[in-house]
Image (tube, rainbow, N blue to C red):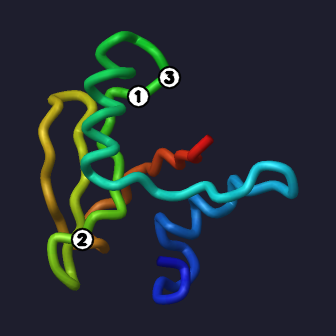
């Protein structure tokens, strides 16, 4: 994603979490956000805000999916329409 996205994007924000010892942070897919909502947010784990979070899943070249952790619903919108937070994740 970082090869095609410019600075200031959600992918760039996720990449900023990388350190010399912990790297490979990424923006979760819509499916991964759904799992985070179902298994973590609903259990009160992870400190998730009652907010929507961008995913890395594109709807098309102009739209991306986000997951609303307040309602549990998934939506897509223009990448530039909303300033939503991101929740970077890391495989371990």
Q: Can you identify the residue that label 3 sits on?
A: 46
Residue beneath the point at 54% across and 73% down: 8
When asked about the image quadrant of residue 73, the answer is top left
Please identify, in this view, whether the residue under mark 3 or under mark 1 is nearer the observer.
Answer: 3
Which residue is at the front of the view, 36 or 73?
Answer: 36
The local crowd at label 3, few if under 14, some if 14 to 19, many if 20 or more residues have their Cα within 10 Å, is few
Please identify, in this view, whether the residue under mark 2 or under mark 1 is nearer the observer.
Answer: 2
Q: Position of residue 34 (x, y in %)?
A: 25, 38
Quarter holding the C terminus? top right
Q: Answer with mark 3 or mark 2, whichever residue precedes in sequence.
A: 3
Q: CA distance from mark 3 to mark 1?
A: 9 Å
Asked if residue 67 is positioned above or below residue 37 in the image, the reply reads: below
Q: Position of residue 45 (x, y in %)?
A: 46, 16
Residue beneath the point at 50% across and 23% down: 46
Q: Answer with mark 2 or mark 1, whichever residue precedes in sequence.
A: 1
Q: Can you identify the residue that label 1 sits on?
A: 49
Residue beneath the point at 22% across and 59% down: 65
Q: Mark 1 falls on what kind of element?
A: loop
Is 71 positioned to the left or the right of 49 in the image?
left
Q: Which mark is residue 58?
A: 2
Q: Position of residue 81 (x, y in %)?
A: 25, 68
Asked if residue 23 is positioned above or below residue 51 in the image, the reply reads: below
Q: Mark 3 falls on what kind of element?
A: loop
Is 20 positioned to the left or the right of 90 in the image?
right
The local crowd at label 2, few if under 14, some if 14 to 19, many if 20 or more residues have their Cα within 10 Å, is some
Q: CA distance from mark 2 to mark 1?
A: 23 Å
When asked about the image quadrant of residue 18, the answer is bottom right
């Amino acid at each position: 994603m970082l090869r095609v996205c410019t600075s200031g994007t959600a992918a760039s924000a996720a990449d900023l979490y990388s350190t010399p010892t912990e790297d490979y942070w990424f923006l979760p897919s819509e499916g991964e956000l759904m799992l985070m909502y179902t298994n973590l947010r609903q259990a009160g784990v992870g400190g998730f805000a009652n907010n929507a979070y961008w995913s890395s899943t594109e709807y098309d070249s102009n739209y991306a999916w986000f997951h609303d952790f307040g309602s549990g619903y998934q939506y897509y919108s223009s990448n530039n329409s909303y300033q939503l937070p991101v929740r970077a994740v890391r495989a371990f």
